[in-house]
């Protein structure tokens, strides 16, 4: 035991926030957050979930495009030993209701753009999750808030000094994903902490990432947890440039504006 530590990508954020506390971690429109701010918000999220009796093995589901909250959920949820379930936003209400039930969702985070879809899905499910709204200022289209409060209000009273620990068993679940259900009901796949850690390490090597890497989020974080990039970019202290909608001209603008070096896990050209 003295010579063993569980492998978990949660260690990446703690390390990077201690080494590069003032380095820019997240860019989203006009929003800029440092690694110390990123880490603090994840701690407050974990604390807020804990205050709602969310703990080890509980599922926190998310219906959202690429937004900063998605990055925070990839850390704040497993800090409790809970499991993040990022739901494919292109599924219909029936499939999403099945996922909420099969995954036994205790909490559902919903971006306002997708509130209509969530509002249709939840009544079809037996699960009765706590619904929290994600009200992204970068979204100016139609959409209502259907939860009991929004994300910022939810984490506001969270403890920024929340004490968390690495999993006792690196084989503990960190994420739950589902297939699209094209041949029946969606099929669930569980990722564990060790696997997420090793995937991130492989991404770093394959993409030749370093602390100067600027990653543009064009792959959805609801696809296999963004191919492990929420963890890989953070491990190296790179920048997460969040993009909620993939749009050709906007991608080119962001590449030029932010000096993007990586997108979809490959060098930007």
Image (spheres, rainbow, N blue to C red):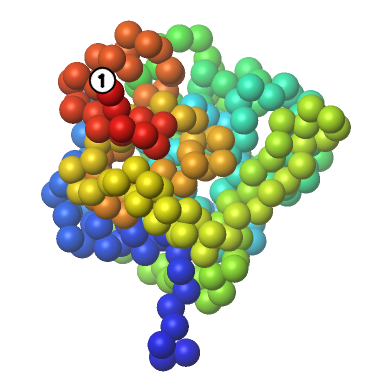
Who's the residue at 69% across and 40% down the image?
Answer: 178
Front residue of 183/57: it is 183
Residue at the extreme right = 184
The correct choice, above or below, for 94 with respect to 211 in the image is: above
The correct choice, above or below, for 257 with respect to 224 in the image is: above
**Res. 80 visible in picture:** no
Which quadrant holds the C terminus?
top left
The correct choice, above or below, for 67 with respect to 76 in the image is: above
Who's the residue at 19% across and 19% down the image?
Answer: 256
Q: Which residue is mark 1?
A: 254
**Res. 240 visible in picture:** yes
Where in the figure is residue 232, as x and y percent of width and height?
Answer: 37, 49
The correct choice, above or below, for 146 with respect to 208 in the image is: above
Who's the residue at 37% across and 11% down the image?
Answer: 248
Left/right of residue 156 with respect to residue 126 in the rendered view:
left
Figure disc tally: 1
Instruction: Give residue 126's quadrant in the image.
Output: top right
Where in the figure is residue 141, as x and y percent of width and height?
Answer: 45, 9
Front residue of 242/113: it is 242
Where in the figure is residue 68, as x and y percent of width and height?
Answer: 37, 35
Where in the figure is residue 206, as x and y percent of width and height?
Answer: 38, 47
């Amino acid at each position: 035991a003295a010579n063993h530590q569980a492998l978990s990508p949660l260690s990446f954020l703690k390390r990077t926030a201690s080494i590069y506390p003032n380095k820019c971690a997240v860019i989203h429109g006009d929003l800029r957050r440092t690694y110390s701010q990123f880490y603090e918000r994840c701690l407050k999220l974990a604390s807020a979930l804990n205050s709602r009796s969310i703990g080890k093995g509980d599922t926190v589901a998310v219906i959202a495009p690429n937004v900063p909250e998605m990055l925070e959920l990839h850390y704040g949820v497993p800090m409790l030993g809970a499991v993040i379930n990022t739901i494919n936003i292109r599924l219909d209400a029936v499939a999403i209701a099945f996922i909420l039930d099969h995954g036994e969702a205790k909490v559902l985070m919903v971006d306002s753009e997708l509130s209509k879809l969530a509002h249709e899905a939840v009544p079809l499910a037996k699960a009765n999750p706590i619904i929290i709204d994600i009200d992204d200022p970068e979204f100016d289209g139609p959409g209502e808030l259907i939860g009991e409060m929004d994300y910022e209000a939810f984490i506001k009273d969270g403890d920024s000094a929340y004490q968390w620990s690495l999993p006792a068993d690196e084989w503990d679940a960190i994420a739950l994903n589902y297939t699209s259900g094209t041949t029946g009901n969606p099929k669930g796949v569980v990722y564990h902490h060790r696997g997420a850690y090793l995937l991130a390490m492989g991404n770093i090597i394959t993409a030749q990432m370093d602390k100067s890497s600027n990653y543009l989020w064009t792959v959805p974080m609801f696809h296999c947890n963004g191919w492990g990039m929420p963890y890989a970019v953070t491990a190296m202290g790179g920048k997460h440039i969040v993009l909620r909608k993939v749009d050709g001209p906007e991608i080119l603008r962001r590449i030029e504006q932010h000096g993007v070096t990586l997108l979809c896990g490959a060098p930007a050209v």
